[in-house]
Image (spheres, rainbow, N blue to C red):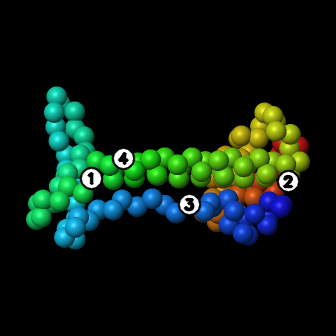
């Protein structure tokens, strides 16, 4: 499958949904609230661990752990797809994989075109690639 088909099919966006943290307890009250705690002069955010209305803890620590793990895998998949897009783009425009100026060109193209998604980045690379050939 060529790069443009992958872009049009949404391949580079990935199939994993963005992870959501289940924040409700059994009675429907928001279980997790961010609050700031200062101990040893370090400020950090912690989660409330139980519902103040019904006392339901609902494995809150396990929920947060699962949520953090899901976020990690989501970010890993997005990073992998972005790297694949960059490699596919580099092959499409005919630049060797180890070209010393590719990173600067791709950064500039990303800056110019990322607001239009992968189409915009690819178009910007097409416009700028003659500068390093």
Mark 3 / mark 4, whichever is N-terminal: 3
* Residue 22, x across and y down, in percent: 33, 62
Which of 10/89 is in front? 10
Q: Secondary structure at mark 2?
A: helix
Give the residue at mark 3: 16
The circle on residue 92 is 2
Distance from label 1 to label 4 (Cα)? 10 Å
Q: Nearer the viewer, mark 1 or mark 3?
A: 1
Distance from label 1 to label 2 (Cα)? 49 Å
Q: Nearer the viewer, mark 2 or mark 4?
A: 4
Is 102 displayed left or right of 49 in the figure? right
* Residue 116, x across and y down, in percent: 64, 66
Mark 1 / mark 4, whichever is N-terminal: 1
Give the residue at mark 4: 65
> Which image quadrant for residue 115?
bottom right
Quadrant housing the N terminus: bottom right
Which of 110/73 is in front? 73
Q: Secondary structure at mark 3?
A: loop
Q: Are marks 2 and 3 in contact (CB under 8 Å)?
A: no
* Residue 26, x across and y down, in percent: 22, 67
Residue in the image at 26% along x and 65% along y: 24
Distance from label 3 to label 4 (Cα)? 18 Å
Mark 1 / mark 3, whichever is N-terminal: 3
Instruction: For label 3, count other residues whose C-alpha is less than 10 Å away and answer few (under 14), some (14-19) or many (20+).
Output: few
Is 91 displayed left or right of 108 in the figure? right
Distance from label 1 to label 3 (Cα)? 24 Å
Q: Nearer the viewer, mark 1 or mark 4?
A: 1
């Amino acid at each position: 499958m060529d790069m443009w088909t992958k872009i049009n099919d949404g391949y580079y966006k990935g199939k994993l949904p963005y992870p959501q943290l289940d924040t409700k307890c059994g009675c429907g009250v928001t279980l997790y609230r961010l609050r700031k705690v200062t101990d040893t002069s370090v400020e950090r955010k912690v989660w409330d661990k139980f519902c103040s209305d019904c006392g339901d803890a609902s494995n809150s620590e396990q929920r947060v752990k699962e949520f953090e793990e899901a976020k990690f895998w989501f970010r890993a998949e997005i990073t992998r797809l972005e790297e694949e897009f960059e490699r596919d783009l580099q092959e499409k425009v005919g630049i060797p994989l180890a070209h010393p100026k590719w990173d600067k060109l791709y950064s500039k193209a990303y800056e110019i075109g990322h607001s239009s998604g992968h189409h915009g980045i690819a178009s910007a690379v097409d416009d700028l690639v003659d500068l390093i050939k």
